[in-house]
Amino acid sequence: MPRNIDAATARALLQTRDDLRRSGCTERDIERLVRDRVVRRVRNGRYVSADAWNGLWNEGRHIVEVVATHLNSDAPGPVFWGPSAAVLHGLPLYRLAPKQVHTAIIGARHGRTCAGVVWHNVEVVSSDIVEIDGIRCTSLDRTVLDLGRATAAGVAVSAADAALRSEAVSGHVQDADAAAAWAGRMSARAERSHGRGIRQARRIIEFADGRAQLPGESVSRLQLARLGFVRPQLQVHVVGPSGEDYWLDFGFPRAQCFGEFDGAGKYLDGEVRGERTAEEVVMAEKTREDAVRGVTGWRTVRWGSSHILSTDAFGATLAAFGIRPPG
């Protein structure tokens, strides 16, 4: 099963108490399965197998919680908001594991928290409510803006990059006109908005770049900006010795280095590796790196998730290879 799932897959994973009874479980059996962590109670009367749950990333776990909340609600169901809307749209939640499901309580005076659900008193116009697999949530644009206002910069920029990528990027190439249209639309929306967090949201929208393929690349770019790299080259195209097309995450001309964010999933996650073994992935990366160095004369510097946790640590990693901000 993939570690990232959509609402339909989440719905299929969930079992009701009646489902478990029909499989032969008694009430005592169900309680024992929960106690022994063979199944996990997601919401009242909604269960998922522990094996399935443990195989999911944070986004997948949260969409299971969102779908369970929807199924336990009266029609038409709540409008999911913020991180809970993000997972319905397939946006990443960089290092964020929501502890509660987030919904917009339309027309209420005060927000509240009940049974693992936070009801936010936020204004959501009807044009900003969409349905995904029959589940209501805020629109993609509104969700990106809300994440920009209410989450850490790494979460917000990863989501904004992913939203822009879905609209303006094909392969590794970003359509400049489509990207400009997205930025203009989102900036105009942010300018019309006010209140807590809106300044960060405006900065995130201005900073977004759909060429980031992974959240780790988005956060790497954020850390580079904090270090003083104003506009690092992104998705640098190199033609190999036999005409191969290679794309490098970052280019640092002054140091004559390419930079690559290397997530562990490339080597360890079967969903990412596809049919290849970890050894085959390593060899392919070595072949690629040798070809790029042979054509350009540039080295390739790699870093992973642990290196981008802090700006200082990332700066020290780059400096060890002679990569320093200009000026």
Image (tube, rainbow, N blue to C red):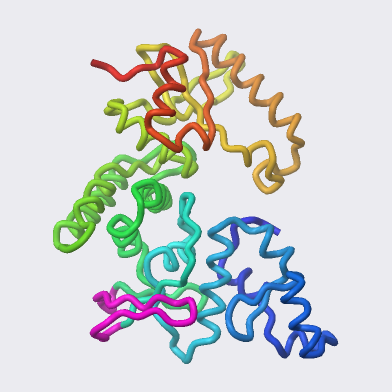
Say above or below: 163 vs 25.
above
Say above or below: 178 vs 136.
above
Q: Which residue is pictured at 46% across the width and 72% down the height?
A: 101
Instruction: Indicate yes or no whether the magenta region holds residue 120.
Output: yes
Q: Quadrant of residue 55?
A: bottom right
Image quadrant occupied by the C terminus: top left
Q: Which residue is pictured at 59% across the width and 13% down the height?
A: 241
Q: Quadrant of residue 56?
A: bottom right
Decide which of 309, 170 is in the foreground and name it. Answer: 309
Q: Which residue is pictured at 78% across the width and 79% down the height?
A: 32
Give residue 63's position: percent from left, percent from top.
54, 67
Give residue 146's position: percent from left, percent from top.
31, 62
Give residue 178's position: percent from left, percent from top.
31, 47
Q: Quadrant of residue 102?
A: bottom left
Decide which of 126, 80 is in the foreground and name it. Answer: 80
* Left or right side of 145 for 248: right
* Left or right side of 34 for 227: left
* Left or right side of 302 for 275: right
State which region is magenta.
106-127
